[in-house]
Amino acid sequence: MSGLFRRHFLILPAAALLFLFVMLPYVNVLVMSLRAPSDSTPYGEGFSAGGYVKLFSDPYYFEALGQTLWLGVLTAFVCFLLGLPIALHISQASRRWRGLLYGIVLSPLLVGIVVRSYGWTILLGNTGVINATLRNLGLIERPLPLMYNSFGIVVALAHVFLPFMVLPVLGALQGLDPAVGSAARSLGASRFTVFRRITLPLAMPGIQSGAILVFVLAVSSYVTPALVGGMRVKTMTVMVVDALIDQFQWPFGSALALSLAVSAGVIVLVFARLTRMKWK
Amino acid sequence: MTEVSILSLVKRYGTALAVNDVTLKVNHGEFVSLLGPSGCGKSTTLKCIAGFETVSDGRILFDGHDISNREPEDRDIGMVFQSYALFPHMTVAGNLAFGLEMRRVARDEINRRVADVMELVQLSQYAGRYPRELSGGQQQRVALARALVIEPAILLLDEPLANLDAKLRDEMRTFIRDLQKRVGITTLYVTHDQGEAMTMSDRVVVMFDGRIAQAAAPEDVYDRPASEAVARFVGNANILTGTVEAGADGAPGLRFGSEGTLLRLPAALPAGTAPGRGLRVMARPEQVRLTAPGAGDATGTVVSHYFNGGFIDYRVRVGADEIMVHAPTADRFADGAAVGLAFDAGRLWPLEGAA
């Protein structure tokens, strides 16, 4: 027992913190989601599974859940497409450039989330910078639908979560022996084949963690979907806040929140399972 | 089998010359070592042959075909790296099959050849293992097999044994050499370890500062080094400096040390050697014998001795010089004892250039 303690005591503070501020609140949310609804108070007497029934029987909520998870997948995929070349480039850059490139990659995180989201509305809006410019150039007559749809949300989310893809992929790439690529070429592989058969598979551990990070962050983001998505695209997080704060329905809001967390968790598990690497 | 010709190879990094006018021909099936201290240009030369470095000047020919500007994948080489550079995400069999897949060999032939080469390097039972599950020596053998299975025109090895422990390194030396002889492949081997170069090679190419200092059979490099630098880099060397004199019988001798001992010199002396001229002569430590004081060619005092298992390494002071003697354990002399030194006149090697 004392041996077990000695080996694991360093994670005690973090474990305690997680238990107190994550596990317990989740239990609280679970209990709340099963409370009976009420019209006059946040929740009523007794218990009921009504919140879940409403969520899964009303297509409005059910589709929102699907839409939210799909946006998360899309954001992760866009971050992968944009992030992989960046990570490849930085991994091959000289030390002098590397610091600067790191700074550029991290720069979206330096701007507050509200400011950044408003920034995107200025760019993407119907009278925003992009549409106004295109209209003035005579390239379009009606404004392009850049905002209040999934496109705008994915653009704004990918912008801020890109570093969470680049950094793990970069970590994986920098751990590689450069001679491995040379060995492949000496065996007859072209540069592209080396990328396809060697570099990409060896970057997979980084891609895997990056994709999970971006997906989880995107699915649980609130401010950006709320501002860029507006009233037309409602993600689960927006609905949770609606239910809890505007409609004052704590059991239903909790059911929404928990359903999102569980389904996102399942997707992460399935993804991790599918991309499992035997060689690690 | 392929013949490799390196013609006036130059590799510049900015203004620095990493390889400075290297010309070398490697014959069909020959095992040639590039030996030198770090930064002497041996690895750069190998990388130029492999195609991982561009050639600044000069040409590299495989069987008369200029391949200087070909991509590495078009050169038909097999290469073994110091870090082995195995593909961590592929099994042993996957690593071995990779080069054959690149050559679009049919699947059943791939399987056959991979099985054959695993037998050759005694790894058949590890086909399904990943590299991280193998020991250093096993990884080394996979790397070797991966380079050989494609039956390349030439085999390039870049310090392949540097990461192994001493005992395994000795085993792998013979293993690689035997394998190379069996396969009969033209081989270039880069090392900083003179023992490796000596035991494995048909020919040793000693390099300093981007240039070839000597290219010769191991015995010649050891017994007849082209310069003092080669003599000192390859094995240990006593360099005796003195003046040439005619001995009592008229044969040339070397007057060296403060005691003015006259050493008999071998008959063949460098051009321009004449009585009265300065001369440097190399004597290997094992070519010097310890005798009773007064019995040898010179007399000295034992400064130190180190027991080395099969031998004892003595340092003997003769005048201002200190002579290294690699003596059998039967000869025992205490530190401070007066001893005689007998040189093997036939194997003294006069070095080129004035003393």
Image: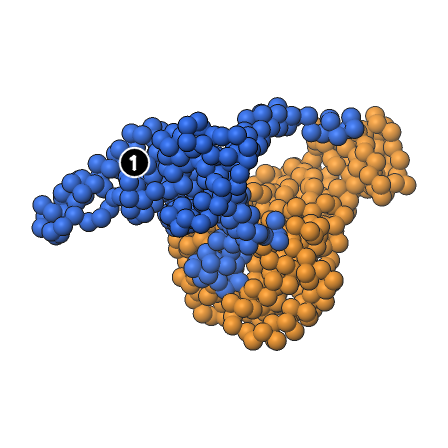
Chain colours: A blue, B orange
Look at mark 1 in the image and give the residue it sits on.
A227
Say left or right for A276 vs A118: right
Indicate the amino acid at tag 1.
Leu
The residue sitting at 56% across, 76% down in the picture is: B106
Question: Residue B270 placed where, x, y %?
Answer: 60, 50
Q: Nearer the viewer, residue B315 or B150?
A: B150
Which is more toward the observer, B202 or A11?
Answer: A11
Is B323 on the left-hand or right-hand side of A269? right
Q: Nearer the viewer, residue A121 or B228?
A: A121
In this rendering, does residue B220 appear at all? Answer: no
Where is residue B324? Give x, y as percent. Answer: 75, 37
**Which image quadrant: the N terminus of chain A?**
top right
Task: Answer with the quarter of the image where residue A153 lies.
Answer: top left
Q: Is residue B100 visible?
A: yes
Name the residue rendered at 60%, 72% in the picture: B110
Q: In this rendering, is residue A108 above or below A235?
A: above
Q: Which residue shows up at 59% across the image and 66% down it? A: B97
Q: In the displayed structure, does residue A67 sit left or right of residue B85?
A: left
Q: Residues within 10 Å of mark 1 (few under 14, many from 20)?
A: some
Q: Position of residue A203 (x, y in %)?
A: 50, 49
Question: Is B285 left, or right, of B228 in this rendering?
Answer: right
- Tell me the element at label 1: helix
- Which chain does tag 1 point to? A
